[in-house]
Image (tube, rainbow, N blue to C red):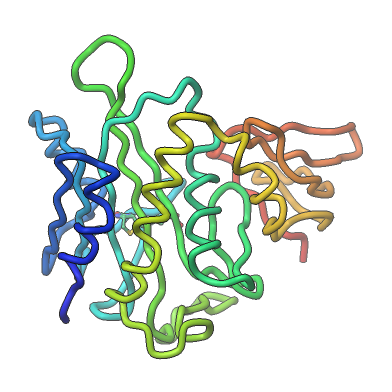
Amino acid sequence: MLWPAEAVWEGVSPLLPGFTVEILPQVDSTNTELMRRARAGRSEPVLLVAEQQTAGRGRLGRGWRSGPGGSLTFSLGLSLAPADWSGLSLAVGVSLAESLDPAVHLKWPNDVWLSDRKLAGILVETASFGGGEAPRYAVIGVGVNIAAPQATGLSTPPAWTGEILAGADAGQVLLRLIQPLVQSIKAFEALGFAPFQARFDARDALRDRAVVLGDGTAGTAHGTTESGALLVHTAAGMLTVTSSDVSVRPAA
Ligand code: BTN
């Protein structure tokens, strides 16, 4: 596969001095690899794309499986010093959704959905290796389904970009979303989640829907707070769900 590495570099390097692009045929996980490098002292801004991951990771300790050519898997690594980290993964979701299609929605905290099916997933991880406070090293991992999924065994088959961007391959999808993504991350660093809140709410797939939290609590989703927490109206009153370790799903 031919990757538009140079065009990506040209779009992003004015925003991130020292930025490099790297395409690997195979790696365990692009997130894991960038964290390994940062631990070894390599924390310059980088986009790492893998044609295949052998141990892709998702949120909540889950795996992320993708066949070669069937998906776009990448991680962006960079040092960031926002005043408040809350809402970063939501801001990433807003950016991806806006770059992809008006029909793309977001399921809190950061699943990218098309017609209630998962189109892309986001795994944001941060670490501090130098000791002291800011900046921290952030790895923003994104997996996008590009090809129609094979039989997955999932009750709801995933969505894929061919449904909205006919004929676009992984490289073209990457080129479409990477520069706006870096711009969004820089905006988040300067301004936090505030500029993204209304944009998230405009694409909120759970808005006013019956939801069930991971612990079985039932309620109705009422959008996000200014720090990106999910508001859920339950029998016990309004709950503010902050932990991204919590899973939320629409009630059956
Ligand atoms: C989720 O939906 O649970 C998040 C999935 C994130 C997958 C991407 S693929 C590129 C990057 N490397 C990983 O190991 N995970 C992320």
Q: Nearer the viewer, residue 59 or 4?
A: 4
x then y, percent, for residue 250: 73, 60
Task: Give the left or right position of residue 245, taking residue 8 as reference.
Answer: right
Residue at horizontal 40%, vertical 48%?
A: 123
The part of the image, by quadrant, that contains residue 112 is: bottom right
Task: State which quadrant residue 178 falls in.
Answer: bottom left
Q: Nearer the viewer, residue 161 or 21?
A: 21
Query: Image height check: is 224 above or below 8?
Result: above
Whole-percent x, y for residue 115 in the image: 65, 75
User: Which residue is outermost to the front?
Assistant: 14
Q: Is residue 11 left or right of residue 184?
A: left
Q: Is 41 rendered above or below residue 12?
A: above
Determine the residue located farthest toward the bottom in the rendered image.
167
Q: Choose top left, top right, bottom left or bottom right for residue 185.
A: top left
Residue at 36% x, 48% y is 182
Q: Position of residue 197 (x, y in %)?
A: 66, 42
Residue 54 % position (x, y): 20, 63
* Residue shown at the point (30%, 25%) measured from the top left: 136
How many discs appear? Answer: 0
| Viewport quadrant of the N terminus | bottom left
> Residue sitting at 22 percent across and 46 percent down?
32
Left or right of residue 177, residue 115 in this image: right
Ligand 1's image quarter is bottom left
Q: Quadrant of the C terminus?
A: bottom right
Against 219, is 175 above or below? below
